[in-house]
Image (cartoon, helix red, strand yellow):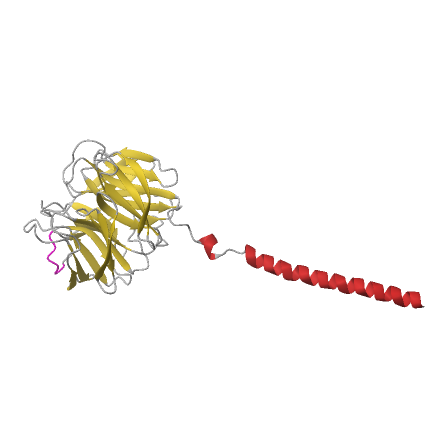
Amino acid sequence: MGRSIKSARFWSAVVFAGLIGALLLVVSGCGDDKTTTTTKSDTTKAVGKVKGKMYVAVTGTGELEAGTGNMGMAVVDLETKSVEMVNIAEAKAPHGIMPTVDSMIAPNTDGRVITAAPKTMLLGNAQDGAVIKIDMATNKAVGTPAMPPAGAKLAICGMYQGPDGKIYLASMGDGKVYPYDSTANTIGAAVATEATTTSICGISWSKDGKYAYLVNMFNPNNTAEPGYVAKVEWPSGKTVSKIDNVTKPSPTGAPMSHQSQTTPDGKWLYVTDGIDGSVVKINMETEKIEKTVPVGKEPHSIIFSADGKTGYIAVRHEPDENTSSIFVYDVDKDTIIDRIPGIKAPLICGIALQEM
């Protein structure tokens, strides 16, 4: 009897220990589940480590007129840093570039960031104001280029998708904004605005789409006037305010402020400064210049990854006079963290990003 009681006590202890062990395993398993679930660091892409491609408008040696050398676009692999030069016969000093609106466009990027390979890209010429459709399967122009309205002095400096889903062309020829219909492949009459801009390169919008920011490059009638940003109601065009002295006056009358882009969160507006070789960071709430970030000899365009952590800047004449580069910018640190050289042209302009 005593042996049976001892035996029962023994097996009861074993069972109790087993239950405790099982409970610990369950608790341990729950902890393991927590540590192996996706964390913020798992889902957030590291700054500068976005895989994908950059599409760059290449003007060759001509600014407003077609010059010699490579002209069309460059396709840059962000991971391998390889560069493919694509010459387009119809390209005449192209400055604008972006995918068609039927692409997989990331939100709050003005149509310049896509999440899948584009079937068609658009190039906007400065020389004749034409918009060209490029079949990315063949790297050839398709159809007839869209031409400006009769009498328009359209010289395309930038292309952007507005809050209404339409594409708008910034003209450095007359300081106006022109709508482009990619379905009909037509360029409409200039959007009426009160702004007295004379040469626009950048167009950006507030996150709510109520305001447009027009970047005036320079004043051909007054070269002592600094570059500025005109804020207008959209789409009425009524002038709201003006952000002065975004860039210094140009001693030669050459373009100063170039293209622009707001961060996806809508907090910052960046303008590229071709005179000082920097990007100008503007607080969208206060409309004040917060900082000027040195980047390279002549930055022309800037774009941000969809998460807003990484910027990409098209910089001319880097690392030498006859080649250009893409600079990679850490937004939080206001610092250039990488450079991708190898674009075989002294003048590059607009950029579009494909993330993978």
Location of residue 47 in the rendering, given as x and y in whole percent from the top left corner: 38, 50
* Quadrant including the N terminus: bottom right
Q: Which residue is drawn at 56% across and 59% down?
A: 34
Location of residue 305 in the rendering, given as x and y in whole percent from the top left corner: 34, 51
Residue 17 as seen in the image, left or right of residue 143: right
Q: Does the magenta stretch include residue 159?
A: no
Q: Residue at x 80, y 64 (%)?
A: 13
Location of residue 311 in the rendering, given as x and y in whole percent from the top left corner: 31, 50
Q: What stretch is highlighted in magenta?
A: 193-198
Q: Give 51 or 332, whichever is nearer the viewer.
A: 332
Evaluate whether residue 34 shows in this view. Answer: yes
| Quarter assignment of residue 71 | top left
Location of residue 181 in the rendering, given as x and y in whole percent from the top left corner: 23, 50
Residue lying furthest left in this view? 221
For residue 47, above or below residue 67: below
Residue lying furthest right in this view? 1
For residue 9, above or below residue 220: below
Evaluate whether residue 98 shows in this view. Answer: no
Majority secondary structure of magenta residues: loop
| Quarter assignment of residue 284 | bottom left
